[in-house]
Image: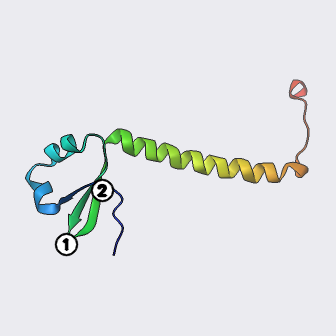
């Protein structure tokens, strides 16, 4: 069985009738649109999608910071006033 990552679900045929109403009724929550009881796609409000992208960017930045901290022994000390 495939996991559905949304509290709100709707069938494809119901969704096609009035997508704007589905978005309103979801009240900022993600909606899984189902086709034959499997998620065909997820509908998100722009603010939710932007928050997801920000979280992913933060994770990527965190990995870069951790990698660079582990290379600290190879760092070269510089005086910013001499540059």
Q: Position of residue 73 (x, y in %)?
A: 90, 51
Compared across the picture, whether 56 is left or right of 15 comes to right
Q: Earlier in the sequence, mark 1 or mark 2?
A: 1
Q: CA distance from mark 1 to mark 2?
A: 15 Å
Q: Residues within 10 Å of mark 2 (few under 14, many from 20)?
A: some
Q: Which mark is residue 56?
A: none
Percent across and percent down for residue 64 are: 69, 50
Q: 39 or 61: nearer the eye?
A: 39
> Residue drawn at (16%, 43%), measured in percent from left and top?
20
Is residue 8 shown left or right of residue 50? Answer: left
Identify the residue at image location x=51%, y=45%. Answer: 55
Residue at left offset 77%, top offset 50%: 68
Of helix, strand and loop, which one carries label 1?
loop
Q: Position of residue 30 (x, y in %)?
A: 31, 50
What residue sits 19% from the left and 40% below the top? 24
Instruction: Please give the residue where the numbered disc 2 appears in the rendered image.
Output: 42
Question: Which residue is more in the foreground, 51 or 25?
Answer: 25
Work out whether 34 lies above or below 19. below
- How many numbered callouts? 2
Q: Is residue 50 above or below residue 16?
A: above
> Residue most toward the top?
81
Q: Are marks 1 and 2 in contact (CB under 8 Å)?
A: no
The circle on residue 36 is: 1
- Classify mark 2: helix, strand or loop: strand
Q: Residues within 10 Å of mark 1 (few under 14, many from 20)?
A: few
């Amino acid at each position: 069985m495939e996991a559905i990552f949304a509290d709100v679900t709707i069938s494809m045929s119901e969704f096609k009738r009035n997508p704007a109403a589905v978005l309103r009724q979801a009240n900022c929550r993600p909606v899984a649109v189902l086709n034959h009881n499997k998620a065909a796609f997820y509908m998100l409000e722009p603010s939710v999608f932007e928050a997801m992208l920000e979280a992913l960017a933060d994770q990527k930045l965190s990995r870069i910071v951790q990698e660079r901290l582990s290379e600290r022994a190879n760092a070269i000390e510089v005086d910013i006033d001499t540059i």
